[in-house]
C-alpha cells in the first residue's frame, strides 16, 4: 500500500493524465507545490514500486496497478468532498478538510461514508432535515 505522500503523487498524476493526456514533472511539482527534484525522486520510487513505468528523459505512464489506485484515490477524494458538502461544511473549507483527513481514514470508513452519502442522496428530504437540524443547533 502506498504511503500518504505516494498517494498524493499518484492521485495528481492520475488527474493530470485524465485531463491532459500526460503528466510532466513540472506540472506535478506545481500542483503539489514541491520542487521538481522531489517529484523526480518520487517518480523513481513509484516506478520501483510498480505504480508507474518511468524512463529517464522520456516520461512515465501509470501501470494498471497505479491506474487502479489512482481511480480509487480520486473516488475517495470526490466522495469526501460530497460528504462534507451534504453535512453542511462551508464550501471554502471542504478542499482543505478533505486534504487533511483523506489519508487518515481506512477504506472501510470510506465505504461506510459512501453508504451514508447514498442514503442521503436517495431521498433529498433527508438532506433538508439534516440542514434544518444544523440550523437549529446553530441557533441554540
Image: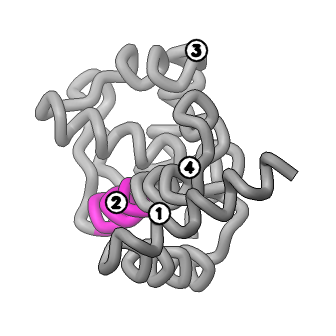
Residue 2 picture location, percent across and down:
57, 62
Q: CA distance from mark 1 to mark 4?
A: 38 Å
Q: CA distance from mark 1 to mark 2?
A: 39 Å
Instruction: Name the residue tied to disc 3.
Output: 35
Q: CA distance from mark 1 to mark 3?
A: 45 Å
Q: Quadrant of residue 51?
A: bottom left
In front: label 1 or label 3: 1
Q: Is residue 108 left or right of residue 23?
A: right
Q: CA distance from mark 3 to mark 4?
A: 15 Å
Q: Foreground residue, 48 or 12? A: 12
Which residue shows up at 70% across the image and 45% down it? Answer: 100
Q: Which residues are magenta?
A: 65-76
Q: Are marks 1 and 2 in contact (CB under 8 Å)?
A: no
Which residue shows up at 38% across the image and 14% down it? Answer: 26
Instruction: Name the residue tied to disc 1.
Output: 128
Q: Are marks 3 and 2 in contact (CB under 8 Å)?
A: no
Labels 3 and 2: the sequence-earlier one = 3
**What is the secondary structure assignment of the residue under circle 1?**
helix
Residue 131 visible in the picture: yes
Instruction: Name the residue tied to disc 4.
Output: 6
**What is the secondary structure assignment of the residue under circle 2?**
helix
Which residue shows up at 57% across the image and 28% down it? Answer: 92
Amino acid at each position: 500500500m502506498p504511503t500518504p505522500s505516494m498517494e498524493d503523487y499518484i492521485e495528481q498524476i492520475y488527474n493530470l493524465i485524465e485531463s491532459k493526456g500526460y503528466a510532466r514533472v513540472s506540472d506535478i511539482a506545481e500542483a503539489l507545490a514541491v520542487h521538481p527534484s522531489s517529484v523526480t525522486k518520487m517518480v523513481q520510487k513509484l516506478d520501483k514500486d510498480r505504480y508507474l513505468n518511468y524512463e529517464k528523459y522520456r516520461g512515465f505512464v501509470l501501470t494498471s496497478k497505479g491506474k487502479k489506485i489512482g481511480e480509487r484515490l480520486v473516488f475517495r477524494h470526490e466522495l469526501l468532498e460530497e460528504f462534507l458538502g451534504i453535512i453542511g461544511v462551508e464550501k471554502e473549507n471542504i478542499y482543505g478538510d478533505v486534504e487533511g483527513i483523506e489519508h487518515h481514514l481506512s477504506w472501510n470508513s470510506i465505504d461506510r461514508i459512501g453508504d451514508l452519502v447514498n442514503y442521503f442522496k436517495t431521498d433529498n428530504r433527508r438532506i433538508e432535515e439534516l440542514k434544518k437540524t444544523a440550523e437549529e443547533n446553530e441557533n441554540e
